[in-house]
């Protein structure tokens, strides 16, 4: 696959290392694309978690494949077709009700490793195990880590933010412009805070000066828990408003004279 995509394994590995750097995997250096032990071929549990997060958020369909427990494979050779069963080596899928993947690994040097993903009550977690002595220990330790994560993590998502008013526009071809939230606020707590006491405060100017460009930031909504600021979401202009020309003022005056 590496040779097909990049022409050589060396070039493919170079791109692997560039991607690792882009993800902030500071303790990772790839030497080959197969994952087998080699001098200088290293990573860390934290870096594996970064890689797993990028994979599962950018390509969530990976869970459709890594949760298959057993599959029959047809192996075609010159001697004919042979069918064999391929079993998933991630035992969490059968032993942990919230498991959603992801990847097991083993070499004689790294021992038994696992990047485990799980989801419960809207919380998605990643647990990484390295150098476990056997499969049983790897699976049990992953469950312990995930159970701890689910016990301390709480997620707040603002599913119904306040309705936004239209903002007045000065010297524009239109008198006002619609607004929209850039995204929905999400906050993860790991300290047992009462997320039911979160408050919101919208900060917007009284008006905007034309020209206004769609997608630019008009203001923000800020989230607090007591005196603690949790974060904010930008409020954007939903449309563009050009600076008013003389003809716009003239037509506006006529409209006031004859229709008001």
Image (spheres, rainbow, N blue to C red):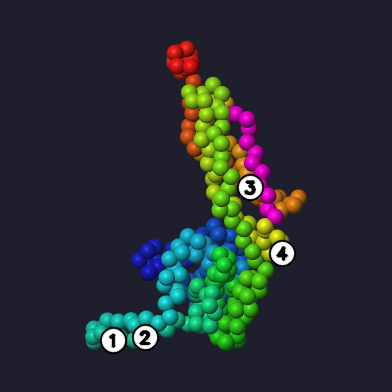
Tell which circle, 4 or 1, labels the residue nearer the N-terminal end.
1
Place of residue 13 in the rendered image (x, y in percent of width and height, measured from the top left):
47, 66
Dominant secondary-structure state across the stretch colored magenta: strand
CA neighbours of label 2 inside 10 A, class few (<14), some (14 to 19), many (20+): few
Check if mark 4's residue and mark 1's residue have beta carbons within 8 Å: no
Judged by depth in the image, the label closer to the viewer, 1 or 3, is 3
Tell which circle, 3 or 2, labels the residue nearer the N-terminal end.
2
CA neighbours of label 4 inside 10 A, class few (<14), some (14 to 19), many (20+): few
**Mark sitting on residue 237:** none
Residue at the (54%, 34%) spot, across then down: 166
Residue that badge 3 annotates: 232
Place of residue 135 in the rendered image (x, y in percent of width and height, measured from the top left):
55, 86
Residue that badge 2 annotates: 85
Residue that badge 1 annotates: 82
Judged by depth in the image, the label closer to the viewer, 4 or 2, is 4
Q: CA distance from mark 4 to mark 2?
A: 45 Å
Classify mark 1: helix, strand or loop. Answer: strand
Place of residue 29 in the rendered image (x, y in percent of width and height, measured from the top left):
56, 67
């Amino acid at each position: 696959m590496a040779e097909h995509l990049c022409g050589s394994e060396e070039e493919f590995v170079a791109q692997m290392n560039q991607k690792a750097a882009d993800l902030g995997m500071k303790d990772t250096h790839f030497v080959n694309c197969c994952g087998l032990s080699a001098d200088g071929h290293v990573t860390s549990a934290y870096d594996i978690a970064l890689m797993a997060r990028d994979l599962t958020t950018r390509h969530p369909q990976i869970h459709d494949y890594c949760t298959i427990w057993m599959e029959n494979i047809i192996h075609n050779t010159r001697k004919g077709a042979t069918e064999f069963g391929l079993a998933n080596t991630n035992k969490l899928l059968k032993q942990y009700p919230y498991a959603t993947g992801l990847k097991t690994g083993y070499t004689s040097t790294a021992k038994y490793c696992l990047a485990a993903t799980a989801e419960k009550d809207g919380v998605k977690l990643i647990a990484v195990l390295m150098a476990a002595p056997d499969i049983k220990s790897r699976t049990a330790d992953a469950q312990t880590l995930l159970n701890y994560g689910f016990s301390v993590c709480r997620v707040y998502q603002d599913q119904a933010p306040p309705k936004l008013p239209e903002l007045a526009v000065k010297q524009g071809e239109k008198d006002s412009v619609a607004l929209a939230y850039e995204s929905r606020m999400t906050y993860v707590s790991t300290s047992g805070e009462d997320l039911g006491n979160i408050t919101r405060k919208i900060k917007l100017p009284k008006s905007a000066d034309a020209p206004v460009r769609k997608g630019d930031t008009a203001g923000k909504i800020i989230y607090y828990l007591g005196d603690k600021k949790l974060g904010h979401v930008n409020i954007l202009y939903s449309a563009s408003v050009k600076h008013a020309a003389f003809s716009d003022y003239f037509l506006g005056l006529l409209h006031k004279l004859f229709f008001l």
